[in-house]
Amino acid sequence: MKRSLWAPGIALVALTISCEPVHQLVAPPLTASSWANEPAGFAPLTDYGFDTAFSPGEGVPVGDGWYLYNPNGYATQVSDPGAPLSPPNVGQWRYPVGFVAGDAPAVMYRPMAATRELYFAFAWKASNPWQGHPSGANEISFVIAQNNILVVQMKGPPGGPYDLMVTAEFTTSNGHLANSEGDDPGARHLFGNVNGGNYVVTPGQWYQIEVYFKMSTTSTSQDGIVRWWVNGTPVGDYNTVNFAADHPFEEFHFSPTWGGIGGSKTEEDYFWYDHVRLSGVATSPPPGDPPPPPPVPAPATHLVVSGQPHDALPYPVATIQPPVQVSALDAQGNTVTTFTGPVTIAIERNAGRFWPGTLRGTLTVTAANGVATFSDLSIDQPGSGYTLRVAAAGLTGAESAPFAILTPTGVP
């Protein structure tokens, strides 16, 4: 579930790149204003009030087209009568002590039809106190497409002040945008430019966040729009943005990633979300244009032993059955069915009772549909507590659960 969208070289704390004095404005108190800045004529894609109990697991449906990747159970539904939009139910994301930077406790995601113009809004609160990270990154939500990622974040040094701002992580050039900073092309931080600067948000308070974007006509036409509001007040308004025009947006994520690389939580912190609405217009390519290419699958990042080794008689009496299976997963824990690389297996912990055991059989297998199956493994020496290590080039390896090789009479 690792997610680190920050590119090397991006300034960690930057409030403005203009020569004007820096203005830091405190967002006004939140009143339940519903969806005040939703464009006229937009149809809701989802209007979800966190009224479904959250369960641990992967790809768990939570209602109205939303799904939850929650392997550790760090995301839960809780009651907050003070929630501003649709109390009492809210979603709570927990960052326990020891939580590693560059990660999100859980991901709640909503697939969408190809979307070139979108309005999204929700209420959000961070716990007080909040342990910031030296990178300044406290990411709140994402809208995702191939070559286009739009991020809402609470940005600032540990201890604050924290600005509510938007980052455009596109493959297009946006260095022309005044009052922005970052890579060109690449991740570009968009700072508040409507009322004189960024809006300072305070942990422990609810804020309603509204964002509207419209993709540019082409990747260089400089006619894309990104606007956002805090508690109904306009903060940012950019109307010359270059999107990667061939790739409409396809998913919305609550994947609140804390920090960049290095460090861990020394206090237990929380994010809360109250009611989320997405609305807009799903469009298709103009008649006669070729359809856009399919999304690029997420790459494999690590291996898991998905079919663990069982106790077995020694070589040459028997092989380890059922076969040991190894799966290649992406950062979200999904099997990458396009992975077809070679996977190797070896003894990691040698538990030979009298002398070290030797692993026999086919020790390198080419994965099929993301899974490598080792069907003829055996070890020649009895022992209890053997483990196996699996590896593949470019991926993080894994160790199996312990198992035993029995004596010919069936004793470990």
Image (spheres, helix red, strand yellow):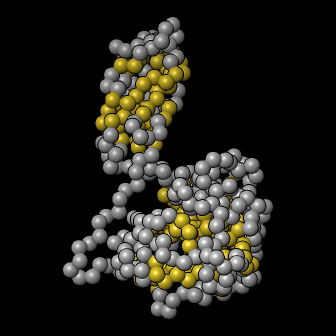
| Relative depth, front residue between 315 and 140 | 140
Residue found at the far left of this picture: 288
Q: Which residue occupies the foreground of this view, 232 or 353?
A: 232
* Number of marks drawn: 0
Q: Residue furthest right?
A: 129
Relative to 358, is 284 on the left or the right? left
Residue at left offset 66%, top offset 85% = 195
Task: Using the image, determine if residue 388 lies above or below residue 169.
Answer: above
Asked where in the image residue 292 lies, by quadrant, the reply is: bottom left
Please provide percent x and percent y for residue 179.
Answer: 58, 76
Q: Could you tell whether 336 is left or right of 122 in the image?
A: left
The residue at 60%/50% (across/down) is: 261
Q: Is residue 355 visible?
A: yes
Which residue is at a point 71% across and 61% down the rendered structure image?
A: 157
User: Is 297 displayed left or right of 70 in the figure?
Assistant: left
Compared with 13, 233 (above or below) is below
Q: Residue 335: x, y in percent? A: 41, 48
**Residue 209 on image: x %, y %:** 62, 77
The reply to whether residue 92 is in sight is no
Q: Nearer the viewer, residue 194 or 99?
A: 194
